[in-house]
Amino acid sequence: MPKAPSAQAGPSKNNGGRPLKPIHKTVELLKKNEGAKRKGKGKEREILGDGVIGLIDEVKRLPGLIQVEKFAEARALEIYAFQSAIKIAAAQGSTRAFQSLPRHLRRRAASHNPRRVPKRLRSKAAAEIDSGDTIAKKHRKIARLRAKGTLRDHLSRTEQFALRQKNKTWLPTHLWHAKRYHMTNIWGYRLPITPTLKSFRPAYRAGRRKVIGFDTSYYGIIELEGQREEIISLLGRISAGKFAGIKYEDGSRVAKIMLYHFDAFPIHLIGEAEVIWQPILEGPNVRRVWLRLHPSIFNEVWDSMKIATSQLRHIGSSKIKELQIRDLRAGINSIDLIGPKAGKVLRRIMRLCRDEKSIKSQFFESLRYMDDPSHLTEGMMIGLKMHDPRLNFPPARLISRDIEDSDEGILRNNAIQPSSDLAQSSLWNSDIREDLSKAAYTKYQLDARRHRLGAPGTKLRLRSDDDRLPIMLYQRSITSSTSPSEGFYGFTILLPSGTWTQYLLSSMVYSGVLFGGIRERAIQHREAGIPSFPEHYGQTCKAGIEWEIRKGDKEKETHDRKPPGKRVEYGLIGTKDPWIANWDKVINGKSTEESIMNGSTKNKPWLLSSPFTAHLKSSLDPSALLKMLNAFRAQRSMSPISSERSQQMFETALVHVEVNVLGRGSPGDMAILSKIPLGERKLWIEAYEKAEKATAGEVSDLHKLGERLPDESEIIGYTSTGNFSLSRGQGYALATITLQGWVDLLKSAEEDNQIGWKGRTIVRVKNRDGALSRLAELKLIL
């Protein structure tokens, strides 16, 4: 006769002499359930196997009193097995092996190729693949042919990759990006647009709290070599902005300018450029200058410089005889690191050579305590020489205490000021760049050296024949004078071409750096309140027009693929130009087609950029604008603009502005900005102030005012990009409006005497796919 339950489970009642039914162990029940599953009875059978009624009968025979803690401890293994069985049963049939990996480790090929998952999951992945799936077999066949050399006429892997770059160029990190990013062909390169994983908020957090990186090796460099007077004479006739003087010519800082065609300022804009002077060396009075350019304008700048030198020689300028212009696109790569921890990441991934000057060693050590690159001078240049980053792999990762700010770090960084000695770098030497285009040791050779060390994770010892890599590091500020608190700060790294960019990227990713694409870079500029090139320069330069057309065609194609019931009918909501901004209608009151049919001269819009925007007032008129422009042209030895063109220049000028939505709503791309008539301004302000008091379900006065479609004569501009701003917690956009419209807004704002609203430039903003206008405030980007 079976014995009563153990005394550990507490006293039990007399069962009247009936035999007790034993309670089966959970493990045995699970085994029984697994057997039922193999027979095909599947999920519809209960986990315990005997049914709910049998379970209730067994519960009735349990002891009346138990000690919970001891009972749980005695059956902890069974409870764990029971919980695991529930999880397995829930996931069985609905989750595949490769889906159990973290998202950043998943690969598309893993759905049909079990070799693309870790070893521990390969047997399960192989069992899940359909027997008719031959994709993996085909890939293995191609791999065998490639190994035998019978594929593509015995071409090596490098030669095969070269064949795939006939009409575009790959970045040095292309293979890494192609597995993780959406790629596109643009500006002659194959570039990453955005990560395949969600990145809007992660990219913002990385730039604000830690660090985000961008491979900017697609930027090109033009080298100018000659006498100082030759360089200044050339750049002075094709640029706007400060680039010469003691502040920049010693090479300690990077200058930012706008480039134009020869003697064409302020029209015929080409784009942005960064000017880097080589530090002064002892010897002949020969200077070198690098112009760092976006790839969309590289060829245009190259042609413009050739024309400019030819024109200067034609007019008999003796300052331009021996100037040499070189293309360095194939010789220098670059990476941007943006975020407060950019300095600490550099300190982890780099190992400075011992023969560097003391001031450079001092700066390098200060990176350990750097809590924000904003503490450094803007554009500050540092030249360093570092060892092969693979010798220091793996680097230390950023940890939580690295995120804390340090007063010591601020003091150390403020003590280091820009200087010519700090900016010296052998990267200016073309022979050194060419020698370092190929690494001295391959990965296989370095792995063999590690293997001989014995203990895993041991850092390699430095040798005299190891590569020593010259780099140039300068502080980058993405900030606007109107909203400096929203800016981003970091570093730009210039280094020799070759595989060094990939080696640095591997170390950066290992240390915790998140990398972004073109979209994340543009969004970062928008959050900082500063236009990015060429996305925000539509209709003002050739590169901006090409970008706008490309974007508009893609959006129109996406729109046209949708059936009529699933797409926005722009004509019904008053949007006549949803894809590309129609500046002809805004400036001339006529569309482009009407201007061509009437044979009228097309007045092309031009951009009034900084520093001229800082002098705009409500009293500005065509003659005052022309006087300001001619004063600058006179400084650069350019002939003045005739007074007959003053009115035309005033009417066709455009300026960049920030759009801050007041209240609800978020502006998108191509939103319409229209001025508010003076009579309606008071109504909009009163409706906005009363909007917070409106009850639920009640249509506010602000909503009623926004229902009126803007008149075409009231439109003053369009947004180039907009969304909800994570920095500001409200709708925000960057836009372009007419100079005439901005002056009118200033006049209306000064005439307003309402408390708290005098001097505030407010407009209506209407999304292209919306029927309601919102109230917004504009701020000029200086």
Image (cartoon, rainbow, N blue to C red):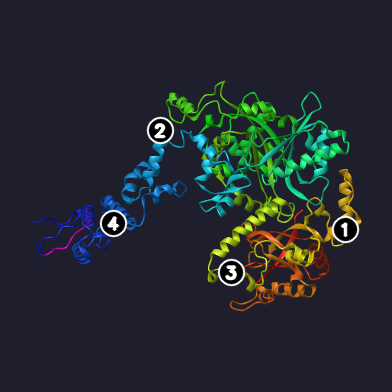
- Most extreme residue toward the bottom is 698
Whole-number angstrom distance, CA of label 4 to CA of label 2: 68 Å
Q: Are marks 3 and 4 in contact (CB under 8 Å)?
A: no
- Most extreme residue toward the top is 464
Measuring from the top left, give residue 252's x and y in whole percent: 74, 35
Whole-number angstrom distance, CA of label 3 to CA of label 4: 63 Å
Within 10 angstroms of label 3, few (less than 14), some, or many (20 or more) residues? Answer: some
Q: What number is the disc on residue 646?
A: 1
Is residue 99 shown left or right of residue 233?
A: left
Q: Are marks 2 and 1 in contact (CB under 8 Å)?
A: no
Q: Which residues are magenta?
A: 8-15
Return the residue at label 3.
568
Please, what secondary structure does the residue beneath circle 2 have? helix
Within 10 angstroms of label 1, few (less than 14), some, or many (20 or more) residues? Answer: some
Return the residue at label 4.
68
Return the residue at label 2.
148
Within 10 angstroms of label 4, few (less than 14), some, or many (20 or more) residues? Answer: few
Marked residue nearer the N-terminal end (3 or 1): 3
Q: Name the amino acid type tagged 4.
A: Val
